[in-house]
Image (cartoon, rainbow, N blue to C red):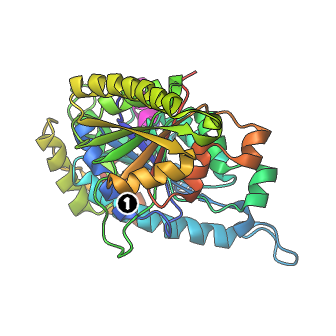
Amino acid sequence: MPKKVLVVDDDPDVRLINRTIIEENGYTALIAEDGEQGLQIIKKESPDLVLLDVLMPKQSGLRLYSQLKTNKSFQKIPVVILSGIAKRTFLRSQKALVEFGGNEVPEPEIYLEKPVESDELGKVLRDLLG
Amino acid sequence: MEIKKLLFVTKFDELRFDALQSLLGLRNAALEHVVFLYVIERDKVAMRRGKGYGKMEELRLKEKANIRFIDWAENLFEQGMEVGGYIVVGGFVQHVVSSCEKEAADLIVIGPPRKGKIEQIYAGSDITEIVRRTQKPLLVYRNPSQKGEVPESPFSRPLLVMDWSPAGERAVAYLKGLNKIVEELNVIHVNDEKDLKGSTVTELQMLRKETRKKLDDICDSLVDAGVNAKPHVYIGDAVNEAEKATEECRATMIIVPTSGKSSWKERFIGSTAGTLAEKSAFPVLIIPDPS
């Protein structure tokens, strides 16, 4: 049974490109348009990896990441951040969330800043999923 | 009534990040989530003879907007806020309404309207239409500073143009929820001069006394809720007097209730809320009728 990769991104073009890369590497792609939908799919499908954008409607990737990493059922799922938001900002924002009462979370497994070459993303998937 | 989520509708040139920053004082009154919306009007990317649909132009405009939103979002994320964004092509009002519904925003912020009078008569005002369809408070933002500096918080010293309608009551309830950020609130009621033709001096004095009594009661309830409120009675045209009062009280924003109904009469003559939103030099917060 192929491993499942969940793409959470509000940009339809990015979703399409990522789906193609995931399927070309022999995995199954699951798709969500925002953080809220992403969490629902994670609960239902338990993906093997999450490819997560940050700036999205309804719920940002920043909050979804915190939710995943502070929930025992999901915290082991590797998360690759794929975003236009800089890694430095992501890490500082996580600290700000802690200051406002959130829990500390580990750094994401891999942080990729858009745009990313398909070869690079494919390699990341293979390294993490085998 | 709390403002937890704000929908910030921008075209970038009329509503920039400094405007949003001036609203961040709302964090002390529960604001935790900002959603950006940029609507690319269809005619900018529409079909052209010999060229077809401007897909490349659409992608270029989207990316340009995305770059601005990323920059703004980084700033807000680092302050511990939740941020989201939409970049869409289509009708302005339609996308403001649908984004507001999807996000369940508590406040919509837009820039000054650009439609001319004739266009408004035939197509209606965007402001009136958004208020009517969302029933959400709408802030028409302007920077009253001529120097281009970052304005102070519009919510620090607002002026409420009170009528005795359900929308007016809603505005009072709204302001009570903002007691942590409102430093001084001036509450005015304008008695229309047209209704007072032929009145004797005694009748005018009686009217002032009655109006003042109602305003006192409202201000007392606001003071009890922790809002420093002061009553004022005006006579004249509601729009002109509201502008005058805003300057006299050195207010930072005008808050005006409205029935939120769009009628043909309103299109031709204009409601107080609509006219203030179109013409005022100050930010105008329109509070629609809850029903």
> What residue type is disc 1 on?
Ala
The residue lying at 31 percent from left, 57 percent from top is: B21
Q: Is residue A36 magenta?
A: yes
Name the residue at 81% across, 77% down: B51
What residue is rendered at 78% in x and 67% in y? Answer: B53
Quarter of the image containing the N terminus of chain B?
Answer: top left
The residue singled out by tag 1 in the image is B19
Q: Is residue B45 left or right of residue B100?
A: right
Instruction: Quadrant for the C terminus of chain B, please.
Output: top right
> Along the line of sight, which residue is nearer the eye, A33 or B91?
B91
Q: Chain of mark 1?
A: B
Q: Is residue A121 magenta?
A: no
Q: Position of residue A90 (x, y in %)?
A: 25, 55
Q: Residue furthest right?
A: B49
Residue B210, how many percent across, how many down?
44, 24
Q: Which residues are magenta?
A: A33-44
